Image (cartoon, rainbow, N blue to C red):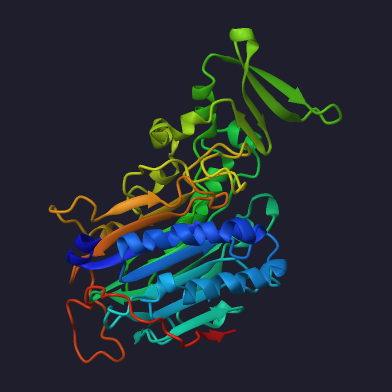
């Protein structure tokens, strides 16, 4: 760890986590989740830490409000985070507004040694220094320090307006401007529908929504900056190709509803071996007899079916994936490695970046692990999604320089000192803006 702290550049840790499960079973899941999260923070010692959460508050947000407050307080005041003396938290808690609610939560933590970090005010169009700890919630639409948008209603499959959208913030760090976008895209409503075509109808809807976001963050309203987009993209494997590969030598039985003749189940059986059932497919069932295929060698054999990002190959870059599919894990706290038999496992949770953002990542030939792209809690139940993170060091002076910002007398090329030994935790409570 000392070696990491001594490496050049500013240490950055970007984490994405769909945390809906944590609020459905807080007693069993939150403690484990936070412990694993803190271990990653401790291992990488970031100067700047961004945590993007989706489904914040769980499926029943109103009933989970007390759990939300407890989770936020723990993150902001825990002993593990005491060196992060400044923070910004943006929680979309306005669950009564169907038109705006996204259930996104964005947390940004600044190490006490980080100097002159600033955040962009989209209304004033200038950077402002970040001091203290502040929480913004309820009506984020009026907060000038971010842009938040829910996807247009006609983007939603089957005309059901679910909680999907994005939140964007802009930062100036190491004299460089960059956007951080928290995103949640549409899921697959039915395994049977996803299986019918390649690419699936759901894949097309996700492409449309992601394209909308990318066009928004590079439009003419603000100076262009590098960007990192990380969240729950709900990217799925090409279902038709996966099923055909897993069940190459199987025969398919179609089960239809007696009253409507609608296909309700597909059963794939081995041609020999006593007609053993290999796969059962229903609207919300993907029951394959051998889950190890998704875990062996981190599921590498299935990466060829992970195709959704290829549409954006000129606009978004991703490091090589070397961890197993991040979803759907069992929500049983004793089953940390087990997948649920509801969906085909897939890499839903990702950290992506613009081509120019690649240049901000400092690679050192003297260190093998300056850049790490991995998941959190491989053997521990973290809910139905495993958080995914990108840890790197930002080179001094890399990328586009920030516009001169409030409170900074001149330009500086290195805006941090190396993390010092822990000090007493700040006793100042965070300021909450509703």
Quadrant of residue 250 in the image? top right
Can I make out residue 361 in this image?
no
Residue 52 image position (x, y, % from top left): 47, 64
Which part of the image, by quadrant, shows the N terminus?
A: bottom left
Residue 362: image quadrant is bottom left
Position of 42 relative to 83 (above/below)? above
- Whether residue 311 appears in this view of the structure is yes
Q: Position of residue 64 (x, y in %)?
A: 68, 67
User: Is 283 on the left-hand or right-hand side of 201?
Assistant: right
Question: Up-down: is 77 above or below 277?
Answer: below
In this figure, what is the number of numbered marks?
Answer: 0
- Viewer-proximal residue, 21 or 212? 21
> Which residue occupies the foreground of this view, 114 or 241?
114
- Kindly identify the residue that appears in the image at 63 percent across and 55 percent down: 156
Image position, residue 228 (x, y; %): 37, 62
Q: Picture quarter containing residue 220?
A: bottom left
**Which quadrant holds the C terminus?**
bottom right
Taking the spot 42% from the left edge, 84% from the top edge, the residue there is: 426
């Amino acid at each position: 760890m000392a070696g990491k702290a001594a490496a050049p550049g500013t240490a950055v840790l970007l984490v994405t986590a769909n945390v809906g499960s944590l609020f459905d079973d807080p007693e069993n899941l939150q403690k484990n989740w936070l412990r694993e999260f803190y271990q990653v923070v401790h291992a990488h010692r970031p100067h700047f830490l961004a945590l993007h959460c989706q489904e914040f508050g769980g499926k029943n947000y109103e009933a989970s409000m007390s759990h939300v407050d407890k989770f936020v307080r723990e993150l902001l005041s825990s002993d593990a985070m005491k060196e992060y003396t400044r923070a910004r938290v943006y929680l979309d808690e306005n669950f009564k507004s169907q038109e705006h609610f996204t259930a996104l939560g964005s947390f940004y933590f600044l190490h006490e040694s980080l100097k002159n970090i600033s955040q962009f005010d989209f209304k004033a169009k200038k950077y402002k220094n970040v001091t203290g700890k502040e929480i913004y919630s309820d009506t984020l639409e009026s907060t000038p320090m971010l842009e938040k948008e829910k996807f247009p209603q006609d983007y939603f499959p089957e005309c059901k307006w679910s909680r999907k959208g994005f939140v964007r913030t802009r930062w100036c760090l190491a004299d460089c401007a960059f956007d951080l976008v928290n995103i949640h895209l549409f899921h697959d409503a039915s395994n049977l529908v996803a299986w019918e075509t390649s690419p699936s109808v759901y894949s097309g809807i996700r492409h449309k929504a992601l394209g909308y976001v990318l066009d928004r963050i590079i439009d003419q309203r603000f100076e262009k900056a590098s960007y990192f987009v990380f969240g729950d993209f709900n990217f799925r494997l090409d279902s038709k190709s996966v099923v055909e590969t897993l069940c190459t030598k199987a025969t398919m039985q179609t089960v239809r509803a007696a009253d409507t003749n609608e296909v309700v189940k597909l059963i794939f059986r081995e041609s020999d071996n006593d007609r053993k059932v290999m796969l059962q497919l229903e609207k919300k069932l993907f029951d394959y007899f051998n889950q190890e295929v998704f875990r062996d060698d981190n599921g590498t054999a299935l990466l060829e079916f992970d195709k959704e990002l290829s549409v954006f190959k000129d606009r978004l870059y991703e490091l090589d994936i070397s961890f197993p599919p991040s979803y759907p894990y069992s929500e049983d706290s004793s089953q940390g490695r087990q997948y649920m038999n509801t969906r085909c496992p897939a890499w839903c949770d990702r950290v992506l970046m613009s081509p120019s953002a690649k240049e901000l990542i400092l690679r050192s030939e003297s260190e093998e692990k300056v850049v790490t792209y991995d998941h959190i809690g491989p053997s521990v139940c973290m809910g139905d999604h495993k958080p995914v993170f990108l840890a790197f060091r930002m080179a001094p002076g890399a990328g586009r320089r920030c516009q001169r910002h409030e409170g900074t007398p001149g330009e500086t090329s290195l805006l941090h000192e190396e993390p010092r030994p822990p000090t007493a935790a700040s006793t100042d409570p965070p300021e909450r803006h509703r």
